[in-house]
Amino acid sequence: MTISRAGALCFALMLASGCGYHRLDRQQRSAAWAKRGETIRLARFRNLTPRLGLEDRFTRALENRLVAASPWRLVAQGEPSRWVLQGTLEDYKSRPIGLTLGNDKTKASAGSASRVEVAVVASVELLDGQTGAVVLSRRGLTFSNQYRVDQNFASFESREVQIIESLADDFAESFLTQLLEGSE
């Protein structure tokens, strides 16, 4: 057997065996809620935090993940569905974790944050859409991220919004993975 034939045979064997990665929405599931083609409705997240608009970002991120990588068909609010996902944002914290010291020539000069950590705590429940019974509950899911603050105050707010978007995406991906893997 020549080297090119051996290489082709090895390549074919690798393709046949698979790489070990599979889309979660295409695997057979043992969990009752993970059946392909059933409907799911996403209730708008409740926001118990002082950060306005946080619920919109988390609802939208989970909605995008459900559409892109789940076995269910997402239905609109008010429509009947086999399953209902509802979530609550319980806590939001933004705290400085790094400081830039102020100017030592002026006694009243204070330092400012150079790094900030944003943390969000959420809980999610999967309900049976027919009975209203809680099928799966995940409490106290905590997601955090850090970012560097430049001294331009206008960029502080936009950078924090980017971090919140990233946290919402991380949350949606993590929760959906847990849900589809059927971990109870």
Image (cartoon, helix red, strand yellow):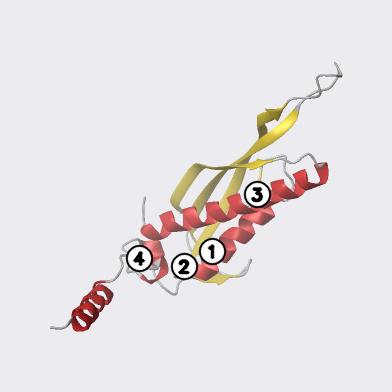
Q: Nearer the viewer, mark 2 or mark 4?
A: 4
Q: Nearer the viewer, mark 4 or mark 1?
A: 4
Crowdedness near tag 1: few (<14), some (14–19) or many (≥20) residues, C-alpha within 10 Å: some
Find the residue positioned furthest to the front.
2
Position of 57 relative to 12 (above/below)? above
Callout 4, which amino acid?
Answer: Tyr
Q: Measured from the top left, where is residue 81 in percent x and y?
A: 52, 68
Callout 2, which amino acid?
Answer: Ser
Q: Nearer the viewer, mark 1 or mark 3?
A: 3
The residue wearing badge 3 is 164
| Circle 2 SS class | loop
Q: Nearer the viewer, mark 2 or mark 3?
A: 3
In the rendered image, is residue 179 in sight? Answer: yes
Q: Measured from the top left, where is residue 160 in percent x and y?
A: 70, 46
- Left or right: 89 in relation to 71: right
Q: Nearer the viewer, residue 72 or 99?
A: 99
Please report the residue visible at 48 percent of the width from the left and 53 percent of the height from the top.
175
